[in-house]
Amino acid sequence: MIKSMTGYGRGESVSDKMIVKVEVRSINSKFFDLNVRMPQMFREKELVIRNLASEKLERGKVDLNVNIEYKGESKINTINHELATSYFNDLKKLAESLNQPTERLMNLVMKMPDVISASKDEIGEDEWKQLNEAVVKGIESIDTFRKEEGATLANELEKNTNNILNTLAEIETLEPERMTLQKAKLRNQLEELLGKDGYDKNRFEQELIYYLERMDFSEEKVRLKSHCDFFFSTIQSKETNGRKLNFIGQEMGREINTLGSKANHAGIQKLVVTMKDELEKIKEQLLNIL
């Protein structure tokens, strides 16, 4: 099973006092990078939220936003008079220096950070539990989204890998022709240099065997098939491991490159290019795997 690093989730918890809404978004990243936006009065719970998110989401650039809606008279606000006065005086001086009107400065002051806040004394254990409930729902929601996206990605990865194996099977059908062409090419070169009867045929066979051994890519084919099988099993394993899939993809690339360098056959080299194209598609998909 694999998971996508891209996802979206939301959670909500409703009580007689308030509605807590949580939205979680994530995109791909090498590491876990969490940005939490929440009302100041709940900041004490941020570390708990970070631990919940990191344990479940593991990797990716994640934005977690908490929104609180109070019902009726449940929200008890306090105004920071000292801070509001400071904001007002600074804005008034600025407006006067720029010859701007000052009639609506209070509207702007009341929107400034930390001018209005919920009374700290009104935040109890029930509010904390409600917040945690909404956060957990949001994290579980995005995790489900990631699994569904991961299933789609798994199908694409398996399709690309099967295409590589099918192309490798096509290459095997061209090997007899490749051997015949290389043997004829070597004989013609020798005849041009030494004449038809000017070389030892036994020595020619020995040199031919040595030459063909250097061109042999049987081991590369075996290793490539093995890497593809390992790739399949890793996709289907219970644990999601994008890093391991990346490492396997790199090994697949090495074998394909070596096979291409030994080919010396136009048809096989074209098929190697096809395998490289499929591998590039795999690498692009792996960037988004958890």
Image: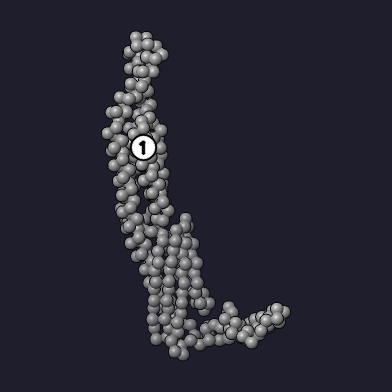
Q: Which residue is situated farthest in the top direction here?
A: 197
**Between residues 237 and 60, which one lies in front from this camera angle?**
60
**Between residues 121 and 282, which one lies in front from this camera angle?**
282
Residue 110 image offset from top left, x and y in percent: 58, 83
- Position of 153 with respect to 83 (left or right) is left
Q: Which residue is situated farthest in the right direction here?
A: 97
Residue 261 image offset from top left, x and y in percent: 41, 33
Could you say which quadrant of the image residue 152 lies in?
A: bottom left
Q: Is residue 209 visible to us here?
A: no
Could you say which quadrant of the image residue 23 lies in?
A: bottom left
Query: At x 32% / y 32%, what residue is drawn?
Result: 218
In this figure, which residue is indicated by the disc labeled 1? 270
Query: At x 36% / y 64%, what residue is drawn?
Result: 145
Q: Tell me, what colour scheme is on the image?
A: one colour
Residue 207 image offset from top left, x and y in percent: 37, 18
Q: Which residue is situated farthest in the bottom direction here?
A: 73
Q: Quadrant of the C terminus?
A: bottom left
Query: At x 48% / y 82%, what residue is drawn?
Result: 123
The amino acid beneath tag 1 is: Lys
- Position of 235 with respect to 193 (left or right) is left
Q: Is residue 272 above or below residue 90?
A: above
Query: At x 32% / y 13%, what residue is drawn?
Result: 202
Could you say which quadrant of the image residue 7 lies in?
A: bottom left
Q: Is residue 116 visible to us here?
A: yes
The number of discs equals: 1
